[in-house]
Image: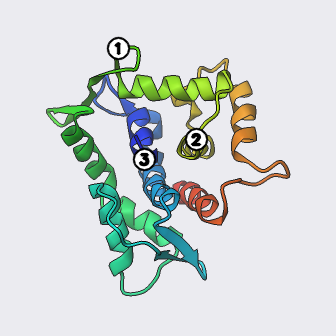
Amino acid sequence: MNIFEGLFVLALDDEEGDFVESIVKTIEYLLSGAILAELAVQNRIDLVDERLHVIDQTPTDHPILDKALFDILETPKPRKLKYWINTLTYNNFLGQVGDYLVVKGMLTRHKKRLHLVSINSSQEINVSAKHAIKSRLRDIVLAEQEPDLSEKVLLAFLYYGDILKLIYTHGERKEVQKRVKKLIEHEEGGIGFGDLIDDILASSCEAIQ
């Protein structure tokens, strides 16, 4: 599961079949940023003179990523990150991700409500994708397991978007904030992924405000 799929699933309130009410106003912008971050992790896009450019046109074989990639490629002139965060949000990529996860079999739709589907975990126990992601991110932070780059970026979206509460309890969050900050930032301060992903995270959070 990639960055934006993980973010989407974590934000879903399975009982209500919709997004957690307290983050409805933020999730669209964070998801748009997460789509761009996934393209950045896959080395498909980069910033040139503060404008977003496609540096690898090869299809990703993921319909959401490919649509975003070719939207960027086909725009008449290069645009800044803020433009693309707002454009992906306006074009309802949030809804398109939900549709894709239904087709993929990770979610079901009933009367416009989305619900998680149980999957087989490595222990052959039926759990939802959300349960599996939460368990993995809890192990990374609380049990100090080593994350991969995508997991670190996902944690960064949760941290800077102020939605770590989707995974960690109220009593855990003070310590979790410290540990996640250490994972994702340079020792001297500042986001620690490199210019492009750092700027995507910053632009996504600025769009929320």
The circle on residue 4 is 3
Answer whether labels 1 and 2 touch (C-beta < 8 Å). Answer: no
Relative to 81, 97 lies left or right: left
Whichever of callouts 2 and 3 sits on the residue coming sooner in the sequence is 3
Note whether 141 is above or below 207 in the view shown: above
Q: Which residue is mark 2?
A: 148
User: Going 24% across and 46% down the picture, which residue do you hit?
Assistant: 100
Disc on the earlier residue, 1 or 2: 1
In the rendered image, residue 2, in percent from the top left (x then y), is placed at: 42, 45
Q: Farthest residue in the left direction? A: 111
Quadrant of the drawing holding the N terminus = top left
Q: Quadrant of the C terminus?
A: bottom right
Q: Up-down: is 162 above or below 61?
A: above
Q: Quadrant of residue 59?
A: bottom left
Which tag is nearer the camera, tag 1 or tag 3?
1
Residue 124, labelled with which disc?
1
